[in-house]
Image: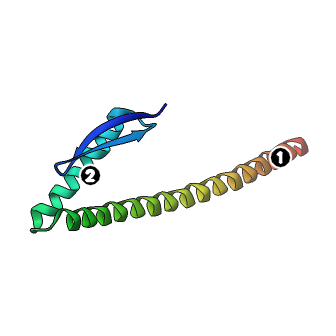
Amino acid sequence: MKSKISITVAGHDFTLVSEESEAYVRGIAAEVDKDIQNVMGEVHLSMSDASVLAALNAADRAKKALESADHLRVQVKTYLDETQKLKSELAEARREISRLKKQI
C-alpha cells in the first residue's frame, strides 16, 4: 500500500509516495542526507553540486555492489557445477565399488 512520507534532506523538505515502509524511506533519506553533508563538508559547494556528487558516489557504490553480486553469482554457479560433477563421480565410484564387491 502506498503512503505519503515527509522527509528532510540537506535542509529541504520532501513528501514522497512509496510502497516501502516509512522506516525504510527515512533510513534511505538519512543516508542521502549524510552523503550530501559529507560532500559539502569536504569543499564549499552549492547544494546542487553537492547533490550531484553525492548521487555519483551513490551510483558508484551501487554499480560496484552489482558487480560484486554478479561475481558471487558466477562463483556460486561454478561451485554448483563442480558439486554436480563430484556427485556424478561419486555415484559412478559407488557403482564400481558395488560391481567389484559382487566379483569377490
Residue 8 left/right relative to 92:
left
Note whether 52 is above or below 2 in the view shown.
below
Label 1 residue SS: helix
Q: Residue at x 26, y 41 (%)?
A: 7
In the rendered structure, the answer to whether residue 13 lies left or right of residue 75 reads left
Residue depicted at x 9% and y 68%: 44
Instruction: Give the residue type at disc 1.
Output: Arg
* Residue position for label 2: 32
User: Which of 76/19 is in front?
Assistant: 19
* 88 over 49 or under it: above or below: above
Task: Tell me the quarter of the picture where residue 74 sits.
Answer: bottom right
Which part of the image, by quadrant, shows the C terminus? top right
Q: Residues within 10 Å of mark 2 (few under 14, many from 20)?
A: some
**Residue bearing mark 1:** 95
Residue sticking out furthest to the right? 103
Residue 14 left/right relative to 88: left
In the picture, measured across the screen, residue 24 lies left or right of residue 92, that is: left
Q: How is the image coloured?
A: rainbow
Residue at 61% across, 56% down: 77
Picture coordinates of residue 81 (x, y %)?
66, 56
Q: Secondary structure at mark 2?
A: helix
> Mark 2 or 1 closer to N-term?
2
Cα separation, mark 2 vs mark 1, equals: 60 Å
In the displayed structure, 38 sits above or below 1; it is below
Percent of width and height locating residue 97: 80, 46
Q: Please report the residue visible at 77 percent of the width from the left and 50 percent of the height from the top.
A: 93
Q: Amino acid type of disc 2?
A: Val
